[in-house]
Amino acid sequence: MAEVWIPPKLQELTCGKQQVQVEGTSVRRLINNLEILHPGIKEFLVDDGEDDLVAGLAVIIDGEVSLLGMLEKVQENSEVHFLPAIGGG
């Protein structure tokens, strides 16, 4: 199972856990399974209207920022982080 690091503001939905183990072969499946384990968390991660991650949220898998969003593949032993995207110029 992938290890998902939970942003601090969402940890109340995971009973204070900073990391949780979740099954999923893509970011989409990972989020859907995360929602089953911790109801309510999906609304903070997914924009239903766009069927993608909410604007301003980046997913980092094994240290690499995903360019595919919900379609990105996740390995069984991956480490996944959801972080606010940082802009600059």
Image: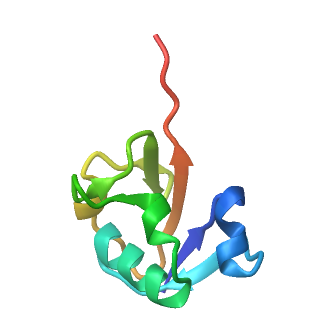
Residue sitting nearer the eye, 65 or 50: 50
Which colouring convention does the figure follow? rainbow
Query: Residue 49 location, x and y as percent?
Result: 23, 55
Residue sitting nearer the eye, 88 or 76: 88
Relative to 45, say whether 42 is above or below. Answer: below
Residue 21, quarter of picture: bottom right
Taking 62 as reference, is 30 left or right? Answer: left
Q: Residue at x 45, y 89 (%)?
A: 36
Q: Residue at x 41, y 82 (%)?
A: 76
Taking 49 as reference, is 22 left or right? Answer: right
How many callouts does the rendering have? 0
Query: Residue 12 location, x and y as percent?
Result: 72, 72
Relative to 19, say whether 53 is above or below. Answer: above
Q: Residue at x 46, y 53 (%)?
A: 60
Query: Residue 8 location, x and y as percent?
Result: 72, 58
Query: Residue 10 location, x and y as percent?
Result: 64, 64
Taking 9 as reference, is 23 left or right? Answer: left
Relative to 32, say whether 80 is above or below. Answer: above
Q: Residue at x 40, y 73 (%)?
A: 31
Relative to 18, say whether 89 is above or below. Answer: above
Outermost residue on the top side: it is 89
